[in-house]
Image (spheres, grey):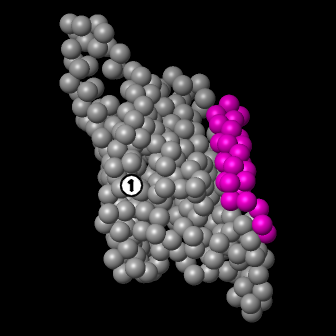
């Protein structure tokens, strides 16, 4: 909104020309979302307590029973901060920006329904797995129909570290991109099991994709670094800035010991938009590296379930996802969180190195 209102005044007042720069608006989108989240956070958490919106803890996770009743659905705070910041600092005529916001709020909406059912029924079971999956597919499918209709967008698949390889998937690209979004959404959801565990790596991944989004939308940088150029997509860097700022604000209250949990409204929304960011900047195959921690957590669940069924009751880990395994080994929660954050930073740096490697 500020861009659309003030940038045209740059012809008369040179100071307003600063709004043309995506980097300037992205930084201020981050600061705005951070301040909004921190300032309204205490009132928001108090409101969740008043309406008795408390977390239901699964009976199998006995170490977390002391956290029962902690306010959940904190993802609403992230969604509000991001939306206000994007509307303030983004170019509201940019279709990619609106698509990104749609994916974020759409996946968050599915998570909201799941959380609402859990809270209203006072039980840890919300939407059925099928209903949740169908909701995610619907959001992903709708946005992909709009995305592939963009003349500047390509259905070619880029291979990190092998930039000359970019096969055109054609119509197969739509289900592939939907799989990326839904998979990322569920991976972040599985990781959200300790205080600050999911939001820390999410902030790192968002900042990494902010770089890729900016490069993809900048014709000179894209040519120099040999990545696919998508005109106009650079504006989504503003969204990335807002998301990073909102994530930091949420971490302010979600850090151990947490005052609020993000709930599925947060984890599904964050994961879904993370997958869409990878799709937008044509780095779908880089996502498993950027979100390496989320992949680790997801694989631990897949391996545990598969091995359990195959052997008739034996387990690889003491408990899945992976962070619960270390909890049951006696590693303090805060130490697990910090170590997993360090791993996420390492994955992010490896992903950034792919920009220069041919």
Specify whether residue 353 is painted magenta: yes
Quadrant position of residue 113: bottom left
Which residues make up the magenta segment?
329-358
Q: Judge by depth and name the residue closer to the eye, 218 or 34.
A: 34
In the image, residue 53 sits, relative to residue 95, either above or below, namely below
Specify whether residue 237 is painted magenta: no
In the image, residue 147 sits, relative to residue 351, either above or below, namely below
Quadrant position of residue 65: bottom right
In the image, residue 246 sits, relative to residue 172, either above or below, namely above
Q: Judge by depth and name the residue closer to the eye, 165 or 205.
A: 205
Image coordinates of residue 215 in percent, x first then y, are 52, 31
Q: Identify residue for label 1.
A: 45
**Can residue 101 be spotted in the picture?**
no
Q: Judge by depth and name the residue closer to the eye, 206 or 65.
A: 65
Q: Quarter of the image for the C terminus: give it.
A: top right
Mark 1 Cα shell of 10 Å, populated few (<14), some (14-19), many (≥20): many
Residue beneath the point at 43% across and 62% down: 71
């Amino acid at each position: 909104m500020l861009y659309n209102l003030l940038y045209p005044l740059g012809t008369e007042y040179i100071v307003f020309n600063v709004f043309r720069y995506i980097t300037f608006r992205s930084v201020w989108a981050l600061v705005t979302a951070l301040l909004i989240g921190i300032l309204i956070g205490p009132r928001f958490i108090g409101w969740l307590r008043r309406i008795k919106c408390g977390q239901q803890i699964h009976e199998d996770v006995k170490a977390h029973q002391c956290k029962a009743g902690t306010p959940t659905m904190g993802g609403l705070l992230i969604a509000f901060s991001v939306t206000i910041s994007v509307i303030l600092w983004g170019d509201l005529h940019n279709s990619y920006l609106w698509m990104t916001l749609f994916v974020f709020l759409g996946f968050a909406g599915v998570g909201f329904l799941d959380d609402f059912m859990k809270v209203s029924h006072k039980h840890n079971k919300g939407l059925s797995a099928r209903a949740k999956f169908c909701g995610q597919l619907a959001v992903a499918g709708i946005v992909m129909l709009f995305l592939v209709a963009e003349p500047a967008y390509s259905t070619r698949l880029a291979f990190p570290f092998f930039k000359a390889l970019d096969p055109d998937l054609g119509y197969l690209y739509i289900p592939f991109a939907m799989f990326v979004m839904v998979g990322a959404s569920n991976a972040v959801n599985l990781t959200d099991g300790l205080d600050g565990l999911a939001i820390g790596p999410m902030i790192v991944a968002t900042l990494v994709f902010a770089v890729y989004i900016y490069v993809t939308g900048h014709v000179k940088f894209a040519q120099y670094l040999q990545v696919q150029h998508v005109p106009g997509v650079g504006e989504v860097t503003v969204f990335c800035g807002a998301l990073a700022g909102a994530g930091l604000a949420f971490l302010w209250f979600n850090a151990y010991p947490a005052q609020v949990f993000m709930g599925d409204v947060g984890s599904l929304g964050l994961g879904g938009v993370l997958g869409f960011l990878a799709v937008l900047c044509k780095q779908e195959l880089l996502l498993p590296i950027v979100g390496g921690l989320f992949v680790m957590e997801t694989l631990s669940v897949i391996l545990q379930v598969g091995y359990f069924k195959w052997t008739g009751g034996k387990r690889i880990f003491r408990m899945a996802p992976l962070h619960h395994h270390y909890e049951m080994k006696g590693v303090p929660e805060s130490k697990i969180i910090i170590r997993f954050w360090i791993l996420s930073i390492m994955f992010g740096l490896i992903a950034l190195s792919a920009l220069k490697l041919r």
